[in-house]
Image: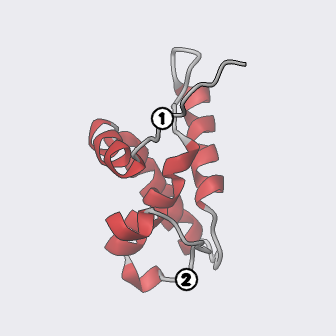
Amino acid sequence: MLTVEKKEVDFDTYFKSYDIANPDIWALFEDLTLMLIKSGRKQLSSEMIINRIRWEGYVTSKNSDGYKVNNNIKPYYSRKFLKLYPEYEGVFKKRHSKADAII
């Protein structure tokens, strides 16, 4: 039986470089989150917002790929949002995450 060693991905570093290289993803995350809050939503999900960003990218992009967003960086975006907008603490239901330490 062949055993393959699984390589650990450092998502802290990955998120930092991804966020710098893809400012449009953050801009959409921020805009959609604020839009939902202003519409009266009290509880949001980073998964819902990231999936909407993917949908937007697929619909508006000239290529068929749309936006590629790794699922493991969703908590980083919600933590980043809450760091910049502490008045909305509680809008994202959070689980313990490695993202807690970086943002």
Question: In the picture, which quadrant includes the N terminus?
Answer: top right
Quadrant location of residue 25?
A: top left
Viewer-proximal residue among 99 and 31? 99
Give the crowd class for mark 1: few <14, some 14-19, many >=20 residues within 10 Å: few
Residue drawn at x 58%, y 66% as measured from the top left: 36
**Residue at image coords 52%, 31%:** 68
**Which amino acid, by three-letter code, is at mark 2?**
Gly
Mark before the other along the chain sequence, 2 or 1:
1
Q: Can you give x and y, in whole percent of width and height, for residue 99 in the image?
A: 43, 63
Is residue 49 shown above or below 8? below
Q: Which residue is mark 2?
A: 90
Mark 2–mark 1 Cα distance, whole angstroms, equals 34 Å
Tag 2, which secondary structure? loop
The residue lying at 30 percent from left, 48 percent from top is 16
Identify the residue shown where x is 59% and y is 16%. Answer: 64
Asked whether the beta carbons under mark 2 and mark 1 sit within 8 Å of each other, the answer is no
In x, y percent, where is residue 23? 32, 43
The answer to whether one can see residue 103 in this image is no
The label on residue 7 is 1
Left or right placement of residue 18 versus residue 70 in this view: left
Q: Nearer the viewer, residue 73 or 21?
A: 73
Hey, what amino acid is under mark 1? Lys
Residue 79 figure quarter: bottom left
Residue 24 marker: none
Left-right relation of 53 to 29: right
**Dot 2: few (<14), some (14–19), or many (≥20) neighbours within 10 Å?**
few
Label 1 element class? loop
Q: Is residue 54 above or below residue 91?
A: above
**Observer able to see residue 12:** yes
